[in-house]
Image (cartoon, rainbow, N blue to C red):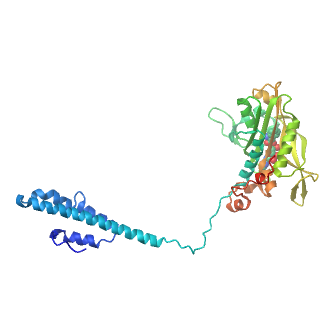
Amino acid sequence: MSLPLDLSPELVDEYQALEATDSLQKLEELRVSLLGKEGKLTLRVKDIAKVAPEQRKSEGQKRNQEKLLFETLLQAKKATLEKRALDARLQEEKIDLTLPIRHQSKGKIHPLTQTFDEIVEIFSQWGFVLAEGPQIESDDFNFTKLNIPPNHPARQMQDTFYMPTSEDGQERVLRTHTSPVQVRTMLTQKPPIRIIVPGRVFRNDSDATHSPQFHQLEALVIDEIGKVTMAHLKGTLLNFFRIFFGIDDLPLRFRPSFFPFTEPSAEIDIGCRKNKGELTLGNYGDWLELGGCGMVNPLVLENCGLDSTRYQGFAFGMGYDRMAMIKYGIPDIRGFFESDVRWLSHYGFSPLDIPSLAKGSIR
Ligand code: FA5
């Protein structure tokens, strides 16, 4: 750009400064100093009244034209500098197709989430509805309504974490099992009831097969007397285990037991072989305990407002961390809760991998 011949001498410095500007920031500073509220060109136009009246017209025109000239030059310079900056960036960010691919770590589904999904998949096909309850539970729902009164020795079966009493004076615990959701359901729904409750529970317990937090799968089925029997309980469990573990002749054994909330009660065992620390499921004569079950105690039905002369039903509860450990060969329960990404990348699942469905074993 060469100097316009008729440019007022007092603007020559600014003109040259504009020419020399090589950054957008400096250009903006120059713009403000010229065209801002107190800018030189703004004031020159404003101060036209101070010029002698006979020169005012021509001087006014000149000052306006010069202001316009600088506005145009500033805009043009801005466009040039912006284009230059963009070109430099494009040059810098040019994609190099010869570079090797950068490693991208993919997330994995936690084996407990996978197991949860498989359980829900199976039971939902049989018409069970998913139910939930709070992890901080009232002593009343966790124990008393389930026929485990205060100071009853049965409370010692479950090593409980006690919580501070709530503001309304309610004794509270970290739920030791998912069975309080039975109570919550019966208090709010009329039979027929058919629910499963997979959820986290807590006990003061820790070794390779016991963890202070673990997961239980609870089920409750209630209907009119005669419609839900112990045979249905056994059939449901047998079919569930066979589908879940993918073993068609997996045997199931009921071992007489005691739970205050079921009568009669049984421990649930499935067939296996234990050989030098290695566990294989199947019809081999050994047994592995997975949980407890029974027919809902009529006292529990009454505690929850159901007429025990009209309704009966079954319930079961088992640890599904153990089921996941067995199915997926995970040796130590504590790994589930340690949030170690290396562990997860080894034992985790790809989001699209649902083995029970992929094998077509849902019937
Ligand atoms: C119960 O918790 C009963 N509520 C089950 C039940 C429900 C019986 C409905 C009848 C009707 P139990 O305390 O045995 O029962 O626990 C059930 C299962 O939870 C155990 O068999 C075991 O698989 C699992 N379990 C118990 N404690 C732990 C622990 N600390 N870590 C991991 N799994 C555990």
Ligand 1: image quarter: top right
| Residue furthest left in the image | 54
| Horizontal side of residue 52 vs 17, given as left or right | left
Residue at coordinates 22% horizontally, 69% vertically from top-left? 14
| Horizontal side of residue 166 vs 7, given as left or right | right
Question: Residue 199 location, x and y as percent?
Answer: 72, 44
| Horizontal side of residue 38 vs 155, given as left or right | left
Instruction: Tell me if residue 105 comes above or below residue 229 in the rendering.
Output: below
Instruction: Tell me if residue 202 comes above or below residue 311 in the rendering.
Output: below
Image quarter of the N terminus = bottom left
Question: Residue 261 location, x and y as percent?
Answer: 81, 34
Task: Give residue 100's quadrant in the image.
Answer: bottom right
Residue at coordinates 21% horizontally, 62% vertically from top-left? 67
Of residue 56 and residue 339, the one placed in the foreground of this image is 56
| Horizontal side of residue 57 vs 335, given as left or right | left
Question: Residue 81 location, x and y as percent?
Answer: 35, 69
Q: How many marks?
A: 0
Residue at coordinates 65% horizontally, 61% vertically from top-left? 106
Residue at coordinates 15% horizontally, 70% vertically from top-left? 6
Task: Give residue 133's quadrant in the image.
Answer: top right
Q: From where the camera sits, is residue 157 visible?
A: no
Instruction: Tell me if residue 91 comes above or below residue 194 in the rendering.
Output: below
Q: From where the camera sits, is residue 14 visible?
A: yes
Question: Residue 203 location, x and y as percent?
Answer: 75, 46
Task: Give residue 274's quadrant in the image.
Answer: bottom right
Of residue 63 and residue 264, the one placed in the foreground of this image is 63
| Residue furthest right in the image | 285
